[in-house]
Amino acid sequence: MPIDISELEKFIIKKLVKDVESEWGSAFDEDGPCTSDRVIALVGKWLCIKITANYSGSTMDQSTDRASGDPEDAHAWYDWIGLAETAPKSVKHPDELNEWAHLATYYRLTFRDVQYPAPFGHHSGRMVKNFTEKGIAELYVVTNRRFQDVSPITQTKEEVIDLNKGKEKRDPKSK
């Protein structure tokens, strides 16, 4: 079942850029344009749609200790899973998929002053870890918004949802 999500993808890119720029204003200097990746997969009777947006640059504030600024990486993951037979043909806004999907998730991750192996930053929301054709979704759910010197995934818990039992509550921040 073909589904056109090109306008939706553009909307998600614009949203991440707006979110980052509203947080930093003129203190953010992008490394390049915001990019996105998409996956559309049929898993049994379920259609799974994932869009990720990535935006990198540098920031300058009173704590910046180098002339080039502090590296900043922002990422947004959107997942929708619903019955393939009822999927829309074309989508322009997350609300359209939120209405259709049995599961809609949004996860936002920001690395501040990107350092490896000691990252720090913040994240929120939840994202799909795995999904089976039987309608079972395994999710990562953020339990601690901030992280420092640990992988962000260590600040989540895992949750399992059976989509055969009905639609799951939507993430309001995905709009």
Image: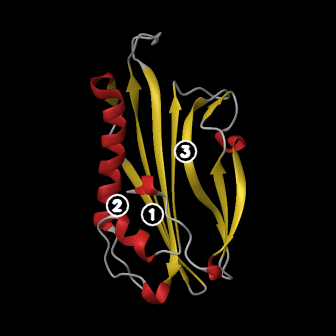
Which of disc 3 and disc 2 is earlier in sequence?
2
- Check the image and report above or below for 51 versus 102: above
Determine whether label 1 and label 2 are within 8 Å by CB: yes
- Check the image and report above or below for 137 versus 118: below
Q: Residues within 10 Å of mark 2 (few under 14, many from 20)?
A: many
- Check the image and report above or below for 32 versus 77: above
Residue ID for mark 2:
9
Cα distance in 3D space between marks 2 and 3 = 20 Å
Which of disc 1 and disc 3 is earlier in sequence?
1
Q: Secondary structure at mark 1?
A: strand
23 or 12, which lies in front? 23
* Residue 128 seen: yes
Cα distance in 3D space between marks 3 and 1 = 20 Å
Residue ID for mark 1:
38
Q: Nearer the viewer, mark 2 or mark 3?
A: 3
In this rendering, the count of numbered labels is 3
Direction bottom: furthest residue? 85
**Circle 2: residue type:** Glu
Residue ID for mark 3:
124
Q: Secondary structure at mark 3?
A: strand
Q: Nearer the viewer, mark 3 or mark 1?
A: 3
Residue 102 location in percent, x, y? 53, 75
